[in-house]
Image (cartoon, rainbow, N blue to C red):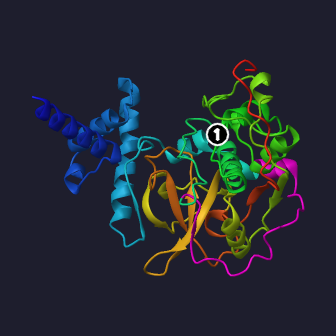
């Protein structure tokens, strides 16, 4: 009996894993609206999406167009693939609005980038590849939800990385504190990373995700939690703009916050491979470069941590083509790169439970 139960549990877990991995479809699913309806119902069940009848018809038409686009793109000889993910019944316009950090908009509001030093300028003999995940300097992929807070997630990747490098400890830090308390940005309505780094320095650090957990919505700033910092920094520096070589030097030393134009349909449905798709320089999303490398066929890439959950892309990551002709880098990745400075392993003393 016990052996049979173990086998059943193992089979169930295997089925759950396969279901969570992806929802595949074939050309047979595209031959009629009836088959597409079946696929849509499978997709809704897979992602636990509830729609009323009127909304369902509208969403089905969007889903149908997206399925066709994914199928057509995957028939082409490109170094990346697309898949049906949780965004499959959203128009691209809706997708942009839900997840945009509006980095370019905030840059225009606040003026030109500040002139800073670039401590990594003299870095030489760069390794052929870097992956800060393998060095234990990157926490698991997080999910910003339907909140334009990617700027906070991008900032936190930089903070978590430099803290691990300087102290040897990987601590998951609070995006929600930045969303609620950093008033130069606008929480779920967007922002950019330089202001967030300035806030962390000014307020003596950032607290942990455990103390100030993420809620994917704007809230009032919790002053008690904000005044319980556990990781502090000495400031931040900007990578010289439109310079992928400079960005490479920075990434060789630590994870780096960057802005990208992530609003394209192919970015919406990216699944795997080195992304070489069309995109502009209307920076609307904050992410973090946590490494770089080269594929076996010689394609250079950046390893980028996103904040759309582990289901999107390569378990929450995207590899983006590196060393392109455009000085801004693919999707503007070299335009707004910035990173935190931490000169010593010193940090504030963690608060006791009584203090919270």
Rendered location of residue 217, percent (x, y): 63, 28
Q: Quadrant of residue 81?
A: bottom left
- Report the quarter where the N terminus lies: top left
Q: Is residue 176 above or below residue 80?
A: above
- Residue 124 falls inside the magenta stretch: yes
Q: Nearer the viewer, residue 75 or 316?
A: 316
Rendered location of residue 22, percent (x, y): 33, 48
267 vs 201, left or right, is left
Residue 145 is at least partly visible in this image: yes
Q: Nearer the viewer, residue 140 or 23?
A: 140
Q: Nearer the viewer, residue 273 or 49?
A: 273
- Residue 178 falls inside the magenta stretch: no
Rendered location of residue 320, percent (x, y): 55, 66
Query: Residue visible at 74% across and 73% down?
Result: 246
Rendered location of residue 28, percent (x, y): 19, 53
Residue 222 is at least partly visible in this image: no
332 vs 295, left or right, is right
Query: Residue visible at 21% across and 47% down?
Result: 32
Which range of residues does the magenta coloring cover?
A: 105-133
Q: Nearer the viewer, residue 135 or 15?
A: 135
Marks counted in the figure total 1
SS category of the residue bearing label 1: loop
Q: Is residue 115 above or below residue 346?
A: below
Query: Residue visible at 71% across and 49% down?
Result: 159
Q: Which residue is mark 1?
A: 148
Please tell me whether the stretch drawn in magenta is mainly helix, strand or loop.
loop
């Amino acid at each position: 009996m016990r052996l049979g139960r173990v086998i059943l549990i193992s089979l169930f877990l295997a089925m759950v894993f396969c279901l969570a991995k992806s929802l595949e479809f074939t050309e047979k699913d595209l031959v009629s609206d009836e088959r597409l309806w079946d696929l849509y119902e499978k997709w809704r069940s897979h992602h636990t999406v509830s729609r009323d009848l009127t909304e369902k018809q509208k969403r089905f038409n969007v889903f149908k167009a997206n399925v066709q686009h994914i199928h057509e793109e995957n028939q082409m000889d490109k170094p990346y693939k697309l898949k049906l993910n949780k965004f499959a019944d959203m128009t691209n316009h809706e997708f942009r609005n839900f997840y945009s950090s509006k980095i370019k908009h905030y840059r225009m509001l606040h003026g030109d980038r500040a002139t800073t030093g670039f401590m990594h300028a003299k870095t030489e003999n760069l390794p052929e590849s870097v992956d800060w995940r393998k060095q234990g300097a990157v926490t698991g992929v997080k999910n910003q939800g339907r909140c334009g807070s990617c700027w906070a997630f991008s900032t936190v990747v930089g903070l978590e990385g430099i803290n691990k490098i300087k102290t040897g400890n990987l601590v998951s830090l609070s995006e929600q504190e930045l969303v609620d308390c950093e008033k130069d940005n606008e929480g779920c309505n967007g922002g950019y990373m330089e202001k967030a780094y300035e806030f962390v320095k000014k307020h003596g650090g950032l607290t942990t995700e455990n103390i100030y957990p993420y809620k994917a919505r704007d809230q009032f700033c919790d002053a008690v939690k904000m005044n319980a910092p556990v990781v502090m920094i000495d400031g931040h520096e900007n990578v010289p703009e439109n310079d992928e070589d400079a960005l490479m030097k920075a990434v060789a030393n630590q994870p780096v916050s960057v802005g990208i134009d992530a609003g394209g349909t192919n970015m919406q449905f990216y699944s795997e491979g080195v992304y070489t798709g069309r995109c502009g320089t209307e920076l609307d999303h904050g992410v973090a470069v946590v490494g770089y490398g080269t594929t076996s066929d010689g394609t250079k890439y950046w390893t980028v941590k996103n904040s759309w959950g582990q289901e999107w892309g390569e378990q929450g990551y995207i590899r983006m083509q590196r060393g392109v002709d455009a000085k801004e880098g693919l999707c503007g990745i070299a335009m707004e790169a910035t990173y935190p400075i931490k000169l010593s392993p010193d940090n504030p003393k963690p608060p006791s439970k009584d203090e919270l």
